[in-house]
């Protein structure tokens, strides 16, 4: 307390003196820093980074944060780096001086999972916060139960970035491991992708390639060619065959390298046997795990980004991960959402500022992240490794950094006139198959998109534009216990989002196929069936993802809002958003990390009220085989209320095909025998909302599969 | 969050009500008379939660948590399980003679009461998810038992708004 008081006086003095830090005594270096020298008191703050594209206006000239003559207490300590030298300063004082405090602590969560205090000053705990932190720190599993020692979660792909402590351990481990040494990089670089061959077809494919090779060899001899290239020159018709044989040969070599790297990084799951050279379940799981670790959206396949990451040294991948983690921390600290997604081929959109100048919409996410990375000296894998060596694991219990970020655009404020537009893109109402079950393609050139705008000086300025989902044909369980198809559309017109729920729970309606509601897991040493709360939430795999906004038609004249069960929510089923055949059950999905950014941004720039945890006592039983399973939901999540609500406009898009309105009844599945005619469809909001894909897994392996 | 239709939640509400009913009279003094299973007893009281388990209808039932038997619900008293606060959920299986086993979950975020509805084995057809068997097709069916093609349902009238 003594030095805290002394420090407070010092800070006040510094502020009164216009933050002229000259003459302030030098600081002790951070306790764990061995090489960092004491910062010179006269150091000026680093120059603001400028974007070559958008040329942001310079930030107002804040003074350098005052280096503290004594070590500030943990809860008010911020690291500041000048000319590569670290020192501690007061976070409060630095923030007052115009610095942004980046939270690098292991107990960081996005804004939506922060624990707020009510008007009475009492804490409003968030049930999911503990699980989020446990997942980010590799201490808990998705149910909130302890993670076995040595296990890793790798959930960045699904919206839960690793903590800095976890990344630190990753850097230090990867410095020692030799996964990249002796790698046949030429084999990896020779292919952009490795084509998938189903395990049961591997032998057949090998025989086919052997036949082709033999055929080409005969042709080569017959044409008196020295090589296959010469053969192609003499007989161009053979080029596709030669290319296929060569590609398969290159892929085989690359596959060997892929297996070696995945094994070295510990990606193969214990107990799942892998047969070398075959893309079997073990391989699929290992690739998925690798993609989760490196946030690669490539659906378990060895496509370009996965192959690139496999070819990079582990520390380079770790550095990429650090940049992603820092990006979310910077975005959270600065409260921005502009990520360059509204840029067109001709460049960024523009708006007119108060002085009448046309100003481009900046990519603040990258610009601010780059600025922070630069100031923290984390611009290379080596520099990042050195940073983690300077700071012990314990440092990340309290570590925050003060950085000077470029000024935000003038349209920023605490009450921004934000709105959302959802364009459904091209929409098909026709059945995607005939009565024999033969699938009919329903191609789309324009996909659903999610747009965030701010109204400023009578202009609608686009801030972000992301792919999203609309509803389509889905399997549902009817009251007769049988599954049918039902068109689960996304309705159109003006709506609002009044309620935003962090860690939302999806109350599975009775129309949910029961097989999706049970999973197996080890419970206290016993492998058994349990209710699949992954789907229900709260959680990153939940049907509503990590956060959801509820679209409603606002009630008028004292009537309540009308809820059609449509939400705009996070999701781990990224293929439903990014694949050509992806659909939802009517909701508008965003990848979890974007949904978190979106709602954190909205909640921080709109008037809102925090209702906090919404306890409930909902239970529902269902029968599977001869066991009763009981879904118990103790809370609907952590609720925020936007006042006034956020306007949303859902555009109809372009209706393709024959039917111009959707079918509203159940449609029998082709080839299934039913006890009678289809029952009536349920019509509640929950009955229409959310939903999960039968047999889905994170990433949405089955999403978009033929019904 | 407000919905004008409440159809499928009716069953939910019923169970929630059962939960409340079963909890009547289970105040703190009642809990102290209940069978109590406690772990990590070194923890302070405020770091623990009490999970009160009772069956509806009241029947003696064994409560298992994975490999471990937590105890018997000693009707008419409940079984109270004491756990560290916020230590993760407990996936429980409750078995009572003559009834279907029930898989349920208890939470440790705060004190809670769990009323477990038991269903007699012979009444399993009353539970959601029960599937009546489709009668076998006639032997002479020339199509090999395949169902007739489902008729194409008519599209919704154009004036009906999409919901």
Image: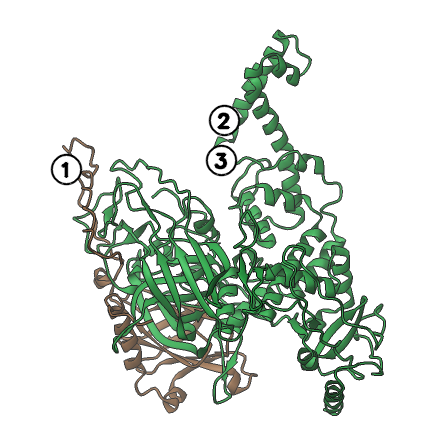
Chain colours: A green, B brown
**Residue assigned mark 3:** A198
Q: Secondary structure at mark 3?
A: loop
Q: Secondary structure at mark 1?
A: loop
Mark-to-mark CA distance, 3 and 1: 39 Å
| x, y percent for residue A244 | 56, 25
Q: Residue furthest front?
A: A356
Residue at 83% in and 74% down: A39
Residue A586 position by quadrant: bottom left
Residue at 52% in and 55% down: A342
The verdict on a common chain for dots 3 and 1 is no
Q: Is residue B10 left or right of residue A122?
A: left
| Camera-nearest residue between A296 and A39 | A39
Label of residue B138 in the image: 1
Give above or below for A135 relative to A97. Answer: above
**Marks 3 & 1, CB-CB < 8 Å contact:** no
**Residue assigned mark 2:** A204
Of the image marks 3 and 2, the number of the one nearer the N terminus: 3
In the picture, the quarter occupied by the C terminus of chain A is top left
Classed neighbour count for the residue bearing mark 2: other residues with Cα under 10 Å, few (<14), some (14–19), many (≥20): few
Residue at 61% in and 16% down: A232
Q: Chain of mark 1?
A: B
Give above or below for A76 relative to A529. Answer: below
| x, y percent for residue A247 | 60, 28
In the picture, the quarter occupied by the N terminus of chain A is bottom right
| Camera-nearest residue between A98 and A172 | A98
| Camera-nearest residue between A520 and A509 | A509
| x, y percent for residue A533 | 42, 63
Q: Is residue A478 left or right of residue A411?
A: left
Q: Taking the image as drawn, is residue A472 in sight?
A: yes
Q: Secondary structure at mark 2?
A: helix
């Amino acid at each position: 307390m003594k030095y805290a008081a002394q420090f407070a006086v010092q800070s006040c003095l510094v502020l009164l003196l216009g933050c002229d830090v000259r003459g302030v005594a030098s600081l002790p270096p951070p306790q764990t820093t061995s090489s960092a020298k004491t910062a010179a008191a006269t150091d000026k703050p680093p120059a603001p980074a400028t974007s070559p594209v958008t040329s942001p206006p310079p930030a107002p000239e804040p003074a350098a944060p005052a280096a503290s003559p004594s070590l500030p207490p943990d809860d008010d300590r911020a690291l500041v780096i000048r000319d590569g030298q670290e020192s501690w300063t007061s976070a409060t004082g630095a923030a007052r001086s115009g610095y942004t405090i980046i939270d690098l602590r292991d107990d960081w969560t996005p804004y939506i999972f922060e624990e707020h205090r009510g008007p009475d000053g009492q804490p409003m705990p968030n049930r999911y916060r503990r699980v989020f932190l446990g997942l980010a720190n590799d201490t808990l599993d998705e149910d909130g139960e302890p993670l076995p020692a040595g296990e890793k979660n790798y959930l960045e792909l699904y919206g839960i970035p690793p903590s800095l402590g976890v990344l630190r351990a990753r850097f230090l481990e990867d410095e020692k491991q030799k996964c990249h040494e002796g790698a046949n990089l030429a084999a990896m670089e020779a292919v952009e992708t490795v084509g998938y061959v189903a395990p049961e077809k591997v032998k057949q494919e090998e025989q086919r390639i052997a036949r082709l090779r033999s055929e080409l060899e005969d042709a080569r001899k017959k044409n008196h060619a020295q090589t296959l290239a010469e053969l192609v020159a003499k007989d161009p018709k053979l080029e596709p065959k030669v290319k296929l044989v060569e590609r398969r040969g290159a892929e085989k070599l690359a596959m060997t390298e892929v297996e070696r790297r995945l094994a070295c990084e510990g990606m193969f799951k214990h107990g799942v046997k892998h047969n070398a050279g075959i893309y079997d379940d073990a391989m699929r799981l290992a690739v998925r795990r690798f993609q989760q670790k490196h946030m690669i959206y490539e659906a378990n396949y060895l496509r370009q980004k996965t192959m690139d990451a496999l070819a990079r040294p582990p520390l380079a991948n770790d550095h990429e991960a650090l940049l992603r983690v820092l990006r979310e921390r910077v975005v959270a600290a600065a409260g921005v959402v502009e990520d360059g997604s509204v840029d067109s081929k001709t460049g960024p959109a523009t708006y007119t500022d108060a002085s009448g100048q046309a100003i481009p919409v900046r990519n603040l996410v990258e610009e601010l992240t780059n600025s922070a990375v630069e100031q923290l000296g984390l611009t290379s894998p080596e520099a990042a490794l050195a940073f983690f060596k300077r700071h012990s694991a314990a440092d990340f219990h309290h570590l925050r950094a003060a950085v000077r970020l470029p000024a935000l655009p003038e349209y920023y404020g605490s009450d921004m006139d934000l709105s959302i537009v959802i364009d459904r893109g091209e929409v098909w109402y026709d059945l995607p198959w005939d009565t024999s079950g033969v699938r009919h393609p329903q191609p789309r050139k324009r996909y659903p998109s999610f747009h965030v705008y701010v109204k400023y000086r009578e202009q609608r300025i686009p801030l972000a534009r992301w792919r999203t989902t609309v509803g389509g044909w889905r399997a549902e369980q009817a009251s007769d216990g049988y599954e049918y198809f039902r068109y689960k559309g996304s309705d159109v017109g003006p709506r609002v989002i009044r309620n935003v729920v962090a860690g939302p729970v999806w109350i599975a309606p009775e129309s949910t196929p029961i097989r999706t509601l049970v999973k197996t897991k080890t419970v206290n040493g016993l492998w058994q069936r349990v209710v699949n709360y992954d789907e229900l939430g709260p959680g990153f795999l939940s049907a509503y993802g990590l956060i959801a906004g509820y679209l409603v038609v606002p009630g008028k004249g004292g009537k309540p809002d009308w809820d059609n069960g449509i939400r705009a929510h996070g999701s781990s089923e990224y293929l439903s958003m990014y694949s050509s055949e992806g659909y939802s059950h009517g909701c508008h999905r965003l990848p979890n990390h974007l949904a978190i950014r979106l709602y954190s941004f909205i909640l921080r720039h709109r008037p809102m009220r925090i209702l906090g945890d919404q306890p409930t006592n909902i239970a529902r039983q269902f029968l599977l085989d001869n066991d009763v399973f009981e879904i118990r939901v103790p809370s609907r999540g952590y609720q925020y209320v936007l006042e006034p609500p956020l306007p949303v406009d859902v555009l109809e898009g372009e209706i393709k095909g024959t039917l111009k309105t959707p079918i509203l009844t159940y449609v029998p599945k082709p080839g299934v025998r039913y006890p009678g005619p289809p029952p009536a469809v349920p019509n509640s909001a929950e009955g229409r909302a959310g939903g999960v894909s039968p047999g889905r897994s994170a990433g949405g392996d089955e999403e978009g599969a033929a019904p | 969050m407000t919905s004008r239709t409440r159809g499928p939640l009716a069953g939910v509400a019923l169970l929630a009500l059962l939960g409340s009913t079963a909890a009547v009279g289970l105040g703190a003094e009642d809990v102290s008379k209940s069978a109590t299973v406690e772990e990590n007893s070194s923890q302070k009281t405020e770091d623990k939660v009490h999970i009160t388990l009772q069956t509806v209808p009241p029947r003696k039932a064994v409560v298992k948590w994975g490999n471990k038997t937590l105890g018997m619900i000693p009707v008419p008293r409940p079984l109270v399980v004491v756990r560290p606060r916020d230590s993760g959920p407990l996936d429980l299986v409750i078995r009572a003679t003559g009834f279907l086993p029930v898989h349920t979950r208890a939470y440790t975020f705060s004190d809670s009461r769990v009323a477990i509805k038991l269903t007699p084995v012979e009444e399993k057809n009353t539970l959601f998810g029960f599937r009546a068997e489709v009668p076998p097709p006639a032997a002479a069916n020339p199509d090999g038992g395949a169902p007739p093609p489902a008729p194409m349902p008519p599209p919704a009238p154009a004036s009906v708004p999409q919901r």
